[in-house]
Image (cartoon, rainbow, N blue to C red):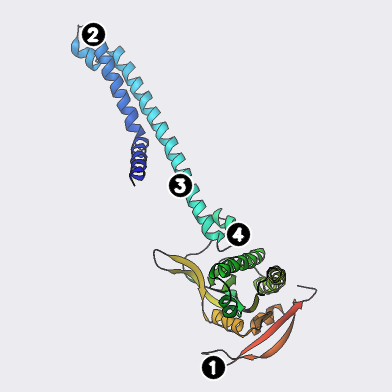
């Protein structure tokens, strides 16, 4: 604590000095004037007041020039310091912004947001987005037979694999929910082919988990299987939370349907809604399944299981 206080005190003193360079320059000029006046008094006792205040034209002009030089020096120093301080503050803000968005967006998109090439609106806005939920099947059984530390390590490795794929398809990681993950395409960054990106990401996740499980099984672990649900529709996107903690997210019935589809998906299955199917039907091989009965909805949800890509995907 004492060391921190000493550091803060030192920084405070430095800040006080650098924020008043103009006054310091003027003060140095006044000191010079006083010293020059005193020396003039010692060199000559005649005309005491004239020597001290520099009333004589030859004396006063020289001192005014020196005063101006010190004032210019202080102004230039103050300007340079302010510019450097502003640049340092901007770098800190950019670093904080970059770190925040790199948790949500792919590194390339995060850099574009920091550079101002892409904008992220902080207010709530209605937009069309594609939402994907991924959830581990049988997670309770997996976690009940393993140590907590091992489960946590498995989840970290699992999410590393999934997030890499999501970022490859330029999706936005909305949140992690235990063994589940929510991803968005179309907010805050949108592409014309967002639904196809989401479906491609879902298929790539299933493919990547084959290698992930091969390594786990070879080390004596249990295979990790997931169900995936995808839906496209209107959402309200924006920052949600309190003044202290906020996160970017989307809400709406579109999100609820994607969650229901994920819950209904079998291990290794990608289920998509009717609207998503309508958009991407030429790019993927799909089969209709029995309507999904969703809790809290008056009608069932038409759903399709994605079996692969076509030549146009």
- Crowding near pointer 4: few (<14 within 10 Å), some, many (20+)? many
Q: Earlier in the sequence, mark 1 or mark 2?
A: 2
Q: Nearer the viewer, mark 3 or mark 2?
A: 3
Residue 68 image position (x, y, % from top left) = 36, 24
Q: Earlier in the sequence, mark 3 or mark 4?
A: 3
Label disc, if present, on residue 298 of the rendered structure? 1
Q: CA distance from mark 3 to mark 4?
A: 22 Å
Q: Is residue 4 above or below residue 105?
A: above
- Crowding near pointer 2: few (<14 within 10 Å), some, many (20+)? few
Residue 274, by quadrant, is: bottom right
Q: Is residue 295 above or below residue 18?
A: below
Residue 3 image position (x, y, % from top left) = 36, 43
Q: Are marks 1 and 4 in contact (CB under 8 Å)?
A: no
Q: Earlier in the sequence, mark 3 or mark 1?
A: 3
Q: Earlier in the sequence, mark 3 or mark 2?
A: 2
**Of the pair 300 and 269, the residue shown nearer to us:** 269
Label disc, if present, on residue 109 of the rendered structure? 4
- Crowding near pointer 1: few (<14 within 10 Å), some, many (20+)? few
Which residue position holds label 2?
A: 42
Q: CA distance from mark 3 to mark 2?
A: 51 Å
Label disc, if present, on residue 89 of the rendered structure? 3
User: Relative to residue 296, is residue 39 drawn left or right?
Assistant: left
Residue 145 image position (x, y, % from top left) = 58, 76
């Amino acid at each position: 604590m004492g060391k921190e206080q000493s550091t803060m005190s030192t920084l405070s003193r430095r800040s006080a000095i650098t924020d008043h360079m103009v006054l310091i320059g003027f003060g140095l000029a006044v000191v010079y004037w006083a010293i020059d006046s005193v020396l003039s008094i010692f060199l000559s006792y005649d005309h005491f007041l004239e020597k001290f205040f520099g009333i004589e034209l030859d004396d006063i002009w020289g001192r005014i020039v020196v005063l101006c030089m010190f004032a210019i020096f202080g102004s230039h120093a103050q300007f340079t310091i302010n510019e450097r301080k502003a640049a340092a503050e901007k770098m800190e803000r950019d670093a904080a912004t970059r770190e925040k968005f790199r948790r949500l967006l792919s590194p390339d998109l995060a850099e574009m947001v920091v550079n101002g090439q892409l904008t992220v609106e902080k207010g709530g806005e209605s937009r069309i987005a594609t939402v994907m939920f991924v959830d581990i099947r049988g997670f309770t059984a997996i976690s009940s037979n393993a140590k907590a530390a091992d489960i946590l390590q498995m989840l970290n490795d699992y999410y590393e694999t999934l997030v890499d794929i999501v970022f490859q398809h330029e999706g936005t990681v909305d949140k992690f929910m235990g063994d589940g993950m929510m991803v968005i395409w179309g907010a805050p960054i949108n592409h014309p082919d967002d639904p196809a990106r989401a479906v491609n990401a879902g298929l790539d996740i299933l493919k990547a988990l084959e290698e992930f499980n091969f390594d786990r099984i070879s080390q004596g672990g249990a295979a990790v299987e997931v169900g995936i649900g995808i839906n496209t529709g209107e959402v309200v996107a924006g920052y949600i939370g309190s003044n202290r903690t906020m996160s970017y997210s989307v809400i709406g019935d579109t999100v609820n349907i994607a969650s229901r589809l994920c819950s209904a998906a079998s291990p290794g299955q990608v289920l998509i809604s009717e609207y998503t199917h309508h958009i991407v039907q030429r790019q993927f091989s799909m089969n209709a399944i029995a309507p999904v009965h969703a809790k809290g909805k008056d009608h069932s949800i038409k759903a399709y299981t994605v079996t692969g890509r076509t030549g146009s995907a």
